[in-house]
Image: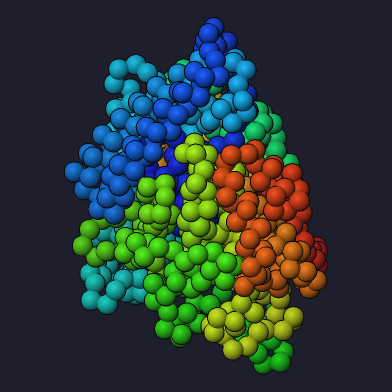
Amino acid sequence: MKKSTRRGLVRVLGAVSLIALAAACGKSAKKHDAEPDAPAPAASASVEDAKAFVDKVETTYRDVFEEAGRIQWVNATYINYDTDWLAAKSAAELTKMSVDFANEAAKFDGADLPADIRRKLDFMKLGIVLPAPSREGAAKELADIATRLGSTYSTGTISLDSAAYRPALTAIRDQGSDLSGAKVRQDETELLMRQLRDPAKLAEVWTKWNDYAAVMKGDYARLVEIANEGAKELGYKDAGALWRSGYDMSPEAFEAETDRLWGQVKPLYDQLHCYVRAELNEKYGDAVVPLDQPIRADLLGNMWAQEWGSIGDIVSVGPANNSNGGPSIDLDKLLVAKGYDPVKMVKTGENFFTSLGFAPLPQTFWERSQITKPKDREVVCHASAWDIDLKDDLRIKMCTTVGAEDFTTVHHELGHNFYQRAYKDQPVLFQNGANDGFHEAIGDMIALSITPEYLKQIGLTDAVPPASEDLSLLMRQALDKIAFLPFGLIVDKYRWKIFSGEIAPATYNDGWWKLRTQYQGIRPPSARPADGFDAGAKYHVPNSVPYTRYFLARILQFQFYKAACDQIGWTGPLHRCSFYGSKDVGAKFNAMMEMGASRPWPDALEAFTGSRQMDGSAIVAYFRPLMEHLEKENAGRQCGW
């Protein structure tokens, strides 16, 4: 996952998170997994009573969400004691309000109501990511813990030897900056993991950041206890069951659905893993990369081994330059050579959406967004997209650097903003994605259209590589898109097991690494402490951002992309399609987005793709040439772990 979504967005803690997409649970609802003591239906509940209650909630939320959103924005872009205090206070009040509304909504559980009213009542419960119990003080304690976890993560630092790391620090810090390794920020650790190639240094940076995460373990365990207590009050087995209930199917059916989708794409991952391990073995040797073991997590160019694109200099297929002498496209270099700065990158992303017929972003977007990291204060650098007032106050928050990764991230975040604006006329409780995977997939589907032909259209390159270069381009995509899939699945599988009690605090680390080895085929560079909390090294865990959305988004973005290419009549290789400039695709896409969460997600999916089922076959089709090549390359190798 990139820095976004990859991202949480605004942290309106525990509320129906309509302001911040990455902190929101998916908002499609059906009957949840209720405990025997779930609230009984009100004997005299009527349609009129339910409608009046829903109207009251939506009116209240519209006002309080804007205030909370502005407080959370200031906290995320100016972290200090006072903004933490304001954020925690606001979150506690909003959490208590949302839990009170959810408990009142539960009184209508057995009533015969119109579908839209029933849907809104369900959303009042399903929109609470961290439900606080109704007992006195619980909401404040939960909010205090959550705010503390978020700040602890974002302000975390590690110490490195200045002399040993001076060249690396010089490469990632502005000219004239302090080159001391005494305080290396969290966002800088990510940059070091992308750039370093010394296994010993990679292991040191990786180990120190994962060791730092252990300070959050106690708070996280307490947060789980409180959230589970609140979820049970709402009639769910635990908070994990609550999270899985937002997809128009039962929690059990949803988990089975994610496993089905993983089964469709796992063969691609297995072939990629086998090839990458062999390439790393050639680079580092048997002592560092044994061919019969999982891959060391620190060698894959990413702190969490979730995307491997940064090791494209080690792992590649095809020639560095095609046989006709044409250049291989290096987007990092092209952006620098063409004089791009962070603002120009964002304007280019906006231009893709306007080419499809969408209106430009409002002037306030440019005035109020944080596009680059301020030099004078601590901020949350994790990229996110914001809808402050549920209308037109759209913003992004990034610490953008000029390069291919953030160029893609910009398209992803703007996808959130254009989706937010598309459904702004829906009732408050329907202002969200059809499911949370939709919200993450919109921008990434646009990013798939960043093809060589598109880069030529916008003047970033003069030449389009011939078909002989396609395998190289597909490998670069696969190192991010395919490598991410198992990670996108296990972050929530891990937390579901914590919420259910299957993984206890004493086994947090063991449980984490069991899943990472089983699904990703990776291992830590050295033995990890049993009392550690390595999962806390990933933003979304201490910040309680549900993560399955990103796995679904990987599936949906290719499904959306293929549908768009079908609509423009594309007949060439799928990976070469770009629908840049197609107003027809834009109109149909906007029609789906305007629905928000007002209809079950299969309705929205069908409106754009013609299918009512999420399907991994589009990924398989996109990467088929690469899959065939990897199967040949891996013939005779010992794959698996």
Side of 629 where 510 appears, left or right: left
How many discs mark residues in the rendered view?
0
Q: Could you tell me if residue 248 is visible in this image? A: yes
Q: Nearer the viewer, residue 82 or 386?
A: 386
Side of 451 where 62 appears, left or right: left
Q: How does the figure colour the protein chain or chains?
A: rainbow
| Residue at position x 48%, y 53% in the image | 421
| Residue at position x 57%, y 67% in the image | 357
Please identify the quarter of the rendering in which residue 454 is found. Answer: bottom right
Q: Could you tell me if residue 626 is visible in this image? A: no
Q: Is residue 453 above or below residue 429?
A: below
Side of 401 where 609 appears, left or right: right
Q: Nearer the viewer, residue 432 or 34?
A: 432
Direction front: furthest residue? 48
Q: Is residue 407 above or below residue 319?
A: above
Direction top: furthest residue? 43
